Amino acid sequence: MKVRPIEAPDLDVWAAMRGRLWPDAAAADLVAEARAFVAGSADQILAAAFIAEDRAATPLGFVELAVRGFSDGCTSMPVPHVEGWYVEPTARGNGVGRRLLDAAEGWARAHGFSELASDTGVHNEDSLRAHQACGFEEVDRLIKFRKALS
Ligand SMILES: CC(C)(COP(=O)(O)OP(=O)(O)OC[C@H]1O[C@@H](n2cnc3c(N)ncnc32)[C@H](O)[C@@H]1OP(=O)(O)O)[C@@H](O)C(=O)NCCC(=O)NCCS
């Protein structure tokens, strides 16, 4: 298995995996964000993205980072934040996710950062356990609200 930076030829497979991670998101938005990153657009929101693939170059998962101005519980600002961390269901439990996070951490260290932030839904126990196993400590829980403005 290999983990490497995502490049332009990975756009379609990356966008497809993003769609599986965020099935409720608009597919066009997921593709546009990915395209902006691989094109190096000035308005891109992602700072780094890595893909894992097996020996046959079959994609297994990805991790992507954005540098946020602030993240709850972190002491450094700005701070890199794991925006997406995904491994294909059939490939889970074999260390792919950890290898992806290692790449993300390596990128963060190489760019002078001292912390890595992440988040997950409060009901996503698998993600919580995986984050903890990979060295993340829980720092906060959040309730989100909305109010329709008519
Ligand atoms: C979270 C996810 C990326 C982990 O990928 P993975 O390849 O299965 O992770 P790994 O096999 O590298 O496991 C890394 C560590 O987490 C632990 N872990 C992974 N899934 C776990 C689970 N469901 N329960 C408990 N521990 C778990 C592993 O045991 C391992 O720790 P260890 O090395 O000490 O044994 C994957 O489960 C996934 O894509 N989930 C759906 C998407 C998601 O929720 N992403 C996170 C929020 S964006």
Image (tube, helix red, strand yellow):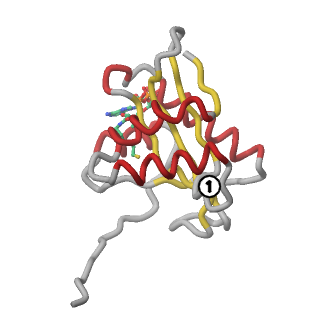
Where in the figure is residue 63, as x and y percent of width and height?
Answer: 52, 39
Residue depicted at 56% across the width and 55% down the height: 81
Mark 1 close to ligand 1, CB under 8 Å: no
> Looking at the picture, how far across and down is residue 77, in whole percent?
67, 67
**Classed neighbour count for the residue bearing mark 1: other residues with Cα under 10 Å, few (<14), some (14–19), many (≥20):** many
Residue with the most extreme bottom position: 150
> Is residue 103 shown left or right of residue 22?
right
Q: Quadrant of the N terminus?
A: top right
Residue 46 vertical position relative to residue 101 in the rendered view, above or below: below
- Which residue position is annotated with label 1? 80
Q: In the picture, residue 101 is in which quadrant?
A: top right
On the image, the x and y values in percent for residue 108 come to 69, 47
Residue 13's place in the image compared with 91, above or below, is below
Amino acid under disc 1: Pro
Q: Is residue 27 left or right of residue 78?
A: left
- Residue at figure coordinates x 27%, y 76% from the top left: 145
Task: Give the side of residue 43 with respect to residue 125, left or right.
Answer: right
Along the line of sight, the residue nearer the viewer: 9 or 78: 9
Ligand 1 resides in the quarter of the picture at top left
123 lies left or right of 43: left
Q: Position of residue 18 (x, y in %)?
A: 41, 41
- Most foreground residue, 27 or 84: 27
How many numbered marks, from 0 up?
1
119 is higher (above) or lower (below) than 9: below
Q: Element under label 1?
A: strand
Q: Residue at x 76, y 49 (%)?
A: 111
Q: Which residue is at 64% across, 51% downward?
A: 47
The quarter of the rendered structure image containing the C terminus is: bottom left
